[in-house]
Amino acid sequence: MAVSADTMLKAVEHGANTLSLLVYGCSLSDTDAYVKTLRNHGLAIHADRAANLAQLGERLDAAYDFYLVNCDLAGDDCQVVLENLRQASEYTPLLLLSGDPATHLPLAQEFNARDLLPPKDEQRLQFAMHREFRDLLAHRELLRLQQRLQEAEQRCSALIHSSRDAIAYVHEGMHVGANPGYLAMFGFGDESELEGLPLMDLIAPEERARFKTVLRKISGNDSADRLEVACIRGDGRTFRALMEFTPSQVDDEPCTQIIIRDQSQFQDLENRIEELTSRDAHTGLYNRSFMMERIEAQVARLDDKRPPMHLLLLTVSNCAEICHNHGVELSESLLQIFSRRLSELTEEMGTLARFGDHDFALLLGPNQDPREAAQQLLDGLAALPGDAPPVDPIFSIGISPSNGPMVLSAGDLVNRALRARHQAESQGGNCFVLYESVEEAVDASSGFDPDVSRLIERAVPEERLRLVYQPIVSLQGDARENYSVLLRLSNDQGQELRPAEFLETARETGHMIEIDRWVIQHALAELSRQREHGRKVNFVITLSREALSDESVVLWLCDCLREYRAKGAWVTLQIRKRDIRADLQAARSTIESLKKINCKVMVDAFDDGASSDALLRHLPIDLVKLKPELLDDIATNPASQESLQELNATLQSRGVKTIALGIEDANTLAALWNVGVNFVQGYFVQPPSAQLDHDDNAGS
C-alpha cells in the first residue's frame, strides 16, 4: 500500500524529534545496537524489525520516517524488499547496509537510496541519520507550505470568482481566464467565449494606439500599474474604465491579472452625492453652502480686468406674520411657489440658492444689470399664479456689488447685501437697495495708499521690515517650539504697520514676491540661529497668492535652506484657502514641490464646508487653522463644542492637525482643550514679540 504525501504529513503529529524506523535484514542484537547508538547521539528512535517478507508486509501498513535494509543478510530477497518499500512510500528515506558496495550500488541507484553504508560502522550510520533527519524536517515543512499554498490558491480563486470587481487573466495580449463580473461587464455568456480573444478587441478603436504601449510593457514585464481607457461592451456601448495590472500565474504559467472598474458608475455616484450635498431638500434649489463656495470662487478671481459681480439677497419680510396668521402648512406651500417662480425668473440671470428659512440669494452673471434684475424679481413675484394662497407677501432685496471698497471675502459681499436688504425692509419692503459706502470708507478700504506705496518702495533698501513671532502652543504635549512668523513695516514716524495695512498696496504695486523672499530669508536665518543653540524651533511662514503661482519662490526657499543649513521639516508654509481656490493647478504644483523638500503645508480659514473637504481630498495638507467663526461661542455653547469636536476628530483621523487662533480668554482655551484641538495661538497665550521667548505660564 503506497503512503501518500498527505499521509506522511499526518504521521509527523507525534513530534518533530521522534523518529520511526523500519529495519529489515538485521539481527535483533544489531538492531538494538543501532537504536542505542542513535539515541546516545540525540535522536529519539522507535524501531520496528521485519525478519522476513511476511513480517515486512504486515509492518508496511504503518508509516515510517526511515527504512534501514541490510542487503547482505536480505540476500536474494533484497530486490523484492526494496520494491515493496518503494511501493509503500516513494518519499521515505532509504538507507542500505552493505559489505560489498560495488554489488549493491545498482540497487541503491534503482530504488533511490539515500546512502550505502558499511554494516558495522555505527558512526557513519549516526552521521547519515542526523543528515536525513534534517532533510526530513525540511521536507515536512515543504509539505506544510505546499498544502497552505494550495489552500490559499483555492481561497483566492473563490474570492476572485465571487468578487464584484471584473477580473481577467491575459497572456501575451490574449484572454486565458475571467471571473463572472468580467463576463457580465462585457456581455459574455461564459468563459469559453473569451478564450483566445485578444484584449485589444475590448478597447475602443480611438484608444487602441495608446493601449498598445501598455501591452508592450506587460509583455516585457515592465511596470504598467494602471490605465484609464475607453472599453467596448458586447452591445457596442463604450464606457470609461480603470484598469489595474498585476503579475500573476495561471496553471503555473506567467500571465497578467487585470482588474477593471467601470468609472461611469463612480461618476454617476459622485454626481448624485454632489447633487444631494449642494441642493436644498425642500425646494430643490442650491443650498447656502453651495452658494458660499460659488461666491468665494468668484471673489477669488476678482481683478481690474473682470466686470464687477453682484449678489442679490431676497427675503420674505412678513414671513413670520404669514406663518402666524395662516399656519405653517400654508407658509411652507407658499415657499414652494416662491421657489418655482424665482427659478423661472432667474433662469438666465445667474445662480439661485435658498439662503435661509425664507431667504434667497442670486449671484448675477456677467453683464447683468443688478437694478433691472431686482426689479424683474419684484414684478415677477407680484404676479404669482392663480392658485397661490390669498396672502400679501412683502419682498425686500439687498444688492451688494464687488466694486467700490475692496471685497476681501465672500463674507464681505454677503454682509453688504444683508445691510442693503435691512435698509430695504426699513423702507417698508417691496423694493431693493444697492449697497453704497460713503466716500471715507472707499478711501480707507481701497487697498491702495500712495503714502504706503512709497514706504514699500523703500522698505527693503532702508530696512523698514521687521519680523515678530507669536507662539503656537501645543495642547497635546508636543515639546517642540512652534512660532508663527509675522511681518511689520515701519513708517517715517516710527510707527509699525500691520500686514492688513500695507499688503494690499504691496500686491497692487507688484512687491509681494520681493516681500515674500525677504521674509523667507530672514526667517530661516533666525531659525538656523535658534537651532544652533539647541532649541527645537519650527516656524510657520505665510506665502502670498503671488508666491503660490511663482515657481521661483520654491527654488529661492531651497537656496535659503542650503545657505542656512536648515531643514525643510522645520518649516510650515501657510497658504490662504481663497488663494488655493483661485488657482488650484498652480497651488497643487507648489504644494507638491514643498512636500518634496519635506516642508509642511497649512491652510487657513478651515471649516466643515464642501470646499474645505475638497482641499483635503486633492491636496497633501498637514495642518489647518480653524475658521475663527467656529470659535465664536465655543466656551458657552455645547452645540458648538460638539460640532467642532466632530470636525476636529474627522481632521485628525485623516492625519491633519488643527490650530485655533484668536484665543482671548481662559474659558475658550479650556473648551478647546476638551474638544481636542492640537494647537492654539492668540494674545491670551502670548502677543507677538521680536524675541522667541514663549512663557508657558502666559495667559494662566
Image (cartoon, rainbow, N blue to C red):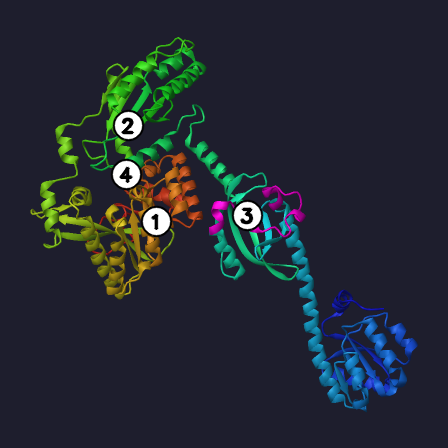
Residue at left offset 78%, top offset 86% = 105
Residue 308 in the image: x percent, y percent?
23, 31
Give the mark nearer the N terminus: 1 vs 2. Answer: 2
Residue beneath label 4, please?
A: 300
Q: Is residue 521 left or right of residue 38?
A: left
> Where does label 1 land, which residue?
588
- Badge 2 is on which residue? 311
The residue carrying pointer 4 sits among few (fewer than 14), some (14 to 19) or many (20 or more) residues within 10 Å by Cα, namely many
- Tell me residue 380's x, y (percent): 33, 15
Q: Which residue is mark 3?
A: 260
At label 2, which amino acid type do we have?
Answer: Leu
Residue 238 forms part of the magenta stretch? no
Name the residue rendered at 17%, 27% in the picture: 437
CA–CA distance in space, label 1 to label 3? 28 Å
Corner quadrant of residue 49: bottom right
Which is more toward the observer, 242 or 664?
Answer: 242
- In the image, residue 412 sits, relative to residue 14, either above or below, namely above
Q: For marks 1 and 2, give the CA distance.
A: 30 Å
Q: Amino acid at mark 3?
A: Ile
Q: Is residue 64 above or below residue 422?
A: below
